[in-house]
């Protein structure tokens, strides 16, 4: 009896161990690529085969500053913010049209709104760059336009899902109580949708913040964002510390936003479920 | 304003959707039209417009190697991302001993720009990178993962980033539905493996399929990772298209447009096939 | 290392990027030489202004400033024999570089650059045969 009991206890122990090992491997898969970035960012000298840097310092930071890091950071922030400011309300209007109102041929309208997900961004940029030049659209405006269109599928999907899950009773109640359309919008609709709006804006911001190829092809070299700086530093040799500092600069702001906004997919489904 | 389903509601709906619809139609329509015109020789930068398929045939040998290469990179990265992403999602929403850490780490990987992922993979997998140092392998004994024949670093970067995306999508679906079903199945006496096969996997399958399809199309059309970590020849479709389009030889530009058109066509085909498969999956589930 | 601008070496040695023993290697078979050209697009909206800028860039004052190692150190395209004596003296008084040989020595066996028609073919061959080989 005692023997059988002990054997039975040993089995879940082994299962727990296997689960722990599996989870450690998964955590390593997610974290390992970022480790050399963190180490290189503070390494003044780190030659092979040393596993850890031989000299710590701020050479990478100095080079990143000299390469125009702060200005690029400002431009990337502005680009992400511009895309978020444009794509979020447009996505919200489209989502409301699709969920609350009737739109002629809703399936086709949704397919068109989601079509930028299918089209490779480089193909759109290559197709449009000469046209934008001929129409004399300023390079930055062209980049913002293309990236806003690229972000619209995300904002539309997130807000459509949130609206579909939402109880419209609050709106009707407010209207019955005599609220004006503006009051309903400000007092009921926007607050109810706020988590999803934040999630959608975050995704749209990421589209502008992370873009490389559209900025490269349509920006015409005038809009030097963080990814462009990282791209040029990473394609040369001997810039590891600078690449690492610039890369971390491109990772930390979205992570801080993520901590503020929460996981978009999870919050966006709304509080109803 | 609350949308009575009549002509007036429909008009309001149209008014609300137009601000998003117009820029999408304008950008997508103009981009496809002008790429197609350029590829067919009807919009040359210099010289007279003349309808010709030369831009598709001139880089035929490069297209012949670029198409399978791009498809293989996208398929390999998507398969790896789907497998790892499903494992991450399961660990993050498991009924017992749910791992908040893995959920948080997946969520934190999603907003990392692909270009940063590429720079990180370069520092990790190059012959003097962090991984060979960690494993104590000398640079000359380390296989060429970056810029090598097998595109390992490129596939690894996409698999890494997209696995986090798959985990987020699948985890979201599983979190809201699988627990109650799983508990019911457990009460009815189903074992771990049976619960996974008959409850979790069917529940996860549509989301897993959709996330995989999005990843596949994304990787197929993505430029910067292959440009940074890939080999100079042969090139995948996006790298080939951008090189031809920015060549100092103006005659190569229509060829770049032709490659862009081919890539867009492939992406569209992939989505149509994926939608069909997903519909069958939904009907079967 | 290989460089398009040997004149910058003087500065790079001075600021310590390269050691003081750095020397320019001249090849027996000849060195590729090239000159920078200024061109005005036929569609330019302001060719008159562009021509004034081109004249300025070719003026003895600017050419002298460009040839000064402290500025750029790039050799002039002007024929010194055709300059007036004051301008010529300016060029003659430029400091000699310890790293870069004088123009006459560097240019003695210079080969003109290949015709532009070869550029894409060479690029393509390099990409396929060397980088992708």
Image (cartoon, coloured by chain):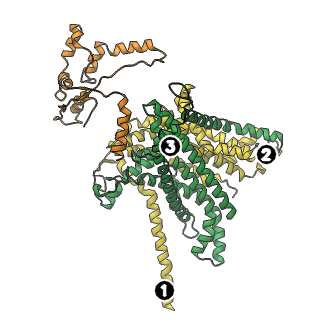
Chain colours: A yellow, B green, C orange
Report the residue at 18% width, 15% height from top. Answer: C92
Location of mark 3 (residue): A210
Quarter of the figure with residue A102: top right
Mark 3 burial class by Cα count in 10 Å: few <14, some 14-19, many 20+ = many
Quarter of the figure with residue B203: bottom right
Tag 1 secondary structure: helix
Mark 2 burial class by Cα count in 10 Å: few <14, some 14-19, many 20+ = some
Q: CA distance from mark 2 to mark 1?
A: 65 Å
Tag 3 secondary structure: helix
A262 is higher (above) or lower (below) than A185: below
Q: Nearer the viewer, mark 2 or mark 1?
A: 1
B196 is higher (above) or lower (below) than C13: below
Residue A6: mark in rendering:
1
Where does residue B9 sit, x and y in percent of width and height? 80, 41
> What subunit carries mark 2?
A
Quadrant, the N terminus of chain C:
top left
Is A182 positioned to the left or the right of B103 in the image?
Answer: right
Q: Mark 2 and mark 1, same subunit? A: yes
Tag 2 secondary structure: helix
Where does residue C10 sit, x and y in percent of width and height? 22, 29
Proximity of marks 3 and 1: CB atoms separated by less than 8 Å = no
Report the residue at 67% width, 53% height from top. Answer: A270
Q: CA distance from mark 3 to mark 2?
A: 41 Å
Q: CA distance from mark 3 to mark 1?
A: 55 Å
Q: Please tell me which residue lies in front, B1 or A138.
A: A138
Quarter of the figure with residue A239: top left
Location of mark 2 (residue): A174
Where does residue C32 sit, x and y in percent of width and height? 26, 29
C40 is higher (above) or lower (below) than B154: above
Where does residue B281 sit, x and y in percent of width and height? 65, 61
């Amino acid at each position: 009896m005692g023997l059988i009991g002990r054997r039975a206890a040993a089995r879940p122990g082994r299962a727990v161990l296997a689960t722990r090992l599996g989870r450690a491997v998964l955590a390593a898969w997610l974290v390992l690529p970022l480790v050399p970035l963190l180490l290189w960012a503070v390494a003044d000298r780190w030659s092979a085969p040393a596993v850890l840097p031989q000299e710590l310092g701020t050479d990478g930071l100095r080079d990143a500053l000299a390469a125009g890091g702060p200005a690029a950071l400002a431009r990337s922030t502005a680009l992400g913010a511009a895309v978020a400011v444009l794509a979020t309300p447009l996505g919200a209007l489209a989502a409301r049209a699709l969920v609350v109102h009737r739109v002629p041929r809703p399936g086709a309208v949704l397919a068109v709104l989601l079509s930028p997900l299918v089209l490779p961004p480089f193909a759109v940029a290559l197709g449009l760059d000469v046209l934008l030049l001929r129409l004399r659209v300023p390079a930055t405006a062209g980049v913002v336009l293309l990236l806003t269109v690229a972000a619209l599928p995300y904002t539309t999907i997130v807000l459509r899902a949130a609206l579909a899950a939402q109880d419209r009773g609050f709106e009707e109640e407010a209207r019955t109580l005599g609220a004006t359309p503006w009051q309903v919008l400000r007092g009921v609709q926007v607050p109810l949708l706020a988590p999803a709006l934040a999630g959608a804006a975050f995704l749209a911001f990421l589209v502008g913040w992370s873009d490389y190829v559209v900025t490269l092809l349509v920006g015409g070299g005038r809009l030097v964002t963080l990814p462009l700086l990282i791209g040029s530093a990473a394609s040369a040799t001997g810039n590891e510390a600078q690449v690492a500092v610039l890369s971390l600069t491109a990772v930390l702001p979205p992570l801080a936003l993520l901590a503020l906004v929460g996981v978009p997919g999870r919050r966006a489904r709304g509080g109803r479920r | 304003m609350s949308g009575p389903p009549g002509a007036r509601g429909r008009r309001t709906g149209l008014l609300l959707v137009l601000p998003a619809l117009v820029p999408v139609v304008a950008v997508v329509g103009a981009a496809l039209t002008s790429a197609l015109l350029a590829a067919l020789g009807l919009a040359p930068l210099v010289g007279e417009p003349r309808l010709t398929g030369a831009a598709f045939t001139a880089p035929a040998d490069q297209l012949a190697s670029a198409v399978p290469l791009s498809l293989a990179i996208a398929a390999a990265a998507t398969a790896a991302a789907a497998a790892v992403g499903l494992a991450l999602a399961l660990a993050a929403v498991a009924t017992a001993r749910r791992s908040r850490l893995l959920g948080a780490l997946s969520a934190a990987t999603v907003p990392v720009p692909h270009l940063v992922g590429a720079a990180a993979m370069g520092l990790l997998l190059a012959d003097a990178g962090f991984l060979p140092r960690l494993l104590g392998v000398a640079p000359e004994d380390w296989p060429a993962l970056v810029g090598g024949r097998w595109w390992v670093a490129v596939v690894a970067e996409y698999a890494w980033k997209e696995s986090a995306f798959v985990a987020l999508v699948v985890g979201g679906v599983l979190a809201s539905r699988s627990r109650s079903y799983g508990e019911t199945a457990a009460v009815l006496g189903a074992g771990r493996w049976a619960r996974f096969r008959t409850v979790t996997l069917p529940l996860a399958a549509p989301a897993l399929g959709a996330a995989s399809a999005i990843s596949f199309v994304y990787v197929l059309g993505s430029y910067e990772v292959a440009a940074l970590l890939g080999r100079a020849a042969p090139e995948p479709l996006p790298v080939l298209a951008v090189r031809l389009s920015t060549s100092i030889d103006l005659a190569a530009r229509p060829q770049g447009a032709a490659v862009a058109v081919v890539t867009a066509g492939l992406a569209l085909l992939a989505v149509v096939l994926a939608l069909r498969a997903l519909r069958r999956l939904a009907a079967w589930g | 290392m290989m460089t398009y601008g040997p004149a910058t070496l003087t500065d790079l040695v001075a600021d310590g990027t390269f050691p003081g023993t750095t020397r320019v290697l001249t090849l027996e078979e000849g060195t590729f030489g090239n000159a920078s050209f200024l061109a005005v697009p036929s569609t330019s909206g302001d060719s008159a202004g562009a021509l004034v800028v081109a004249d300025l860039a070719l003026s003895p004052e600017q050419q002298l400033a460009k040839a000064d190692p402290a500025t750029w150190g790039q050799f002039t395209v002007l024929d010194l024999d055709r300059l007036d004596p004051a301008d010529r003296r300016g060029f003659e008084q430029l400091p000699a570089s310890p790293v870069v040989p004088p123009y006459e020595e560097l240019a003695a066996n210079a080969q003109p650059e290949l015709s532009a028609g070869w550029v894409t073919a060479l690029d393509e061959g390099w990409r396929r045969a060397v980088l992708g080989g």
